[in-house]
Image (spheres, rainbow, N blue to C red):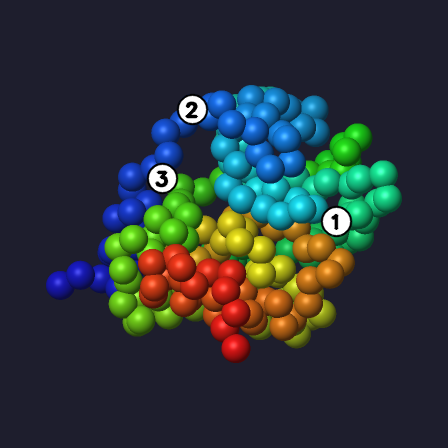
Amino acid sequence: MHSDTERLSAVVARPPFPLRLPALRSAAGRVPGSVVGGRYRLLHCCGGGAEFEFWHGRDIVTDRDVGLTVLSCDAGGAVDVDEVFARTVWMCGVNTPALARIVDMVDTDSGGVVVAEWQSSCSLATAASVVPTRSEATRSARPLTDAMRIAHRSGGVLHLDAPGRLRVGAGGHLYVAFPGTLPSADRFADVRGLASALRGLLHGGAGYGAPVW
């Protein structure tokens, strides 16, 4: 008999991409192999938006893999990096498998970087390829649902509406791999993001980011 997370965990056991530097630039023009924040090397872009990108990276000081939320601040100040850090720092005191542990927040010339521990994991699209059952998907999201409830009670926001921010860990659970809450994020966006992630898992990834109501 298979466990509820066995099929999700089987995908994580196989890395979703080889550990090499792709030749393509990110949408914001960042190049794999370059260094941000003085010590974090970019390895693979995992998504993002106009104001931020999510990168699998490596700390060149400790030689450990990290998850990087790279914030962009243009000449007009599109992202208030200090406010992002202020809205994110509360996560440092939360111990839950639904949030990657934050290890650093760094100002850069072009914005800032939120640095989190990297876990053995895969993207939602990769996890969805095994077609988890509704019960498995619900169990996968339970720690994240609890974390979202705690965040909202304390006035925090996880910013779950950004595609690529969530990944599926080795235990089969959804978690925030790339913390970093923008000023525009709100509770409703969290609810929409979680619902979209669940629908994406159940429908081969096609539902993530799409309207749910």
Q: Are marks 2 and 3 in contact (CB under 8 Å)?
A: no
- In the current view of this chain or complex, which residue is farthest to the right? 76
Locate residue 100, reporting x and y percent: 53, 49
The type of residue carrying mark 2 is Arg
Q: CA distance from mark 1 to mark 3?
A: 30 Å
Residue 30 appears anywhere in the view:
yes
Residue under label 1: 85
Name which residue type carries label 1.
Phe
Per the model, the C-alpha gap separating discs 2 and 3 is 12 Å
> Residue 115 falls in which quadrant of the image?
top right
Position in image of residue 125 (x %, y %): 38, 51
Q: Is residue 113 left or right of residue 207?
A: right
Q: Nearer the viewer, residue 158 or 127?
A: 127
Direction from residue 172 to residue 52 in the image, left or right = right
Is 186 or 22 nearer to us in this picture?
22
Residue 101: x percent and y percent? 57, 47
Report the mark closest to the observer, 1 or 3.
Answer: 3
166, 100: nearer the viewer: 166
Residue linked to disc 2: 20
Q: Secondary structure at mark 3?
A: loop
Q: Which residue is mark 3?
A: 16
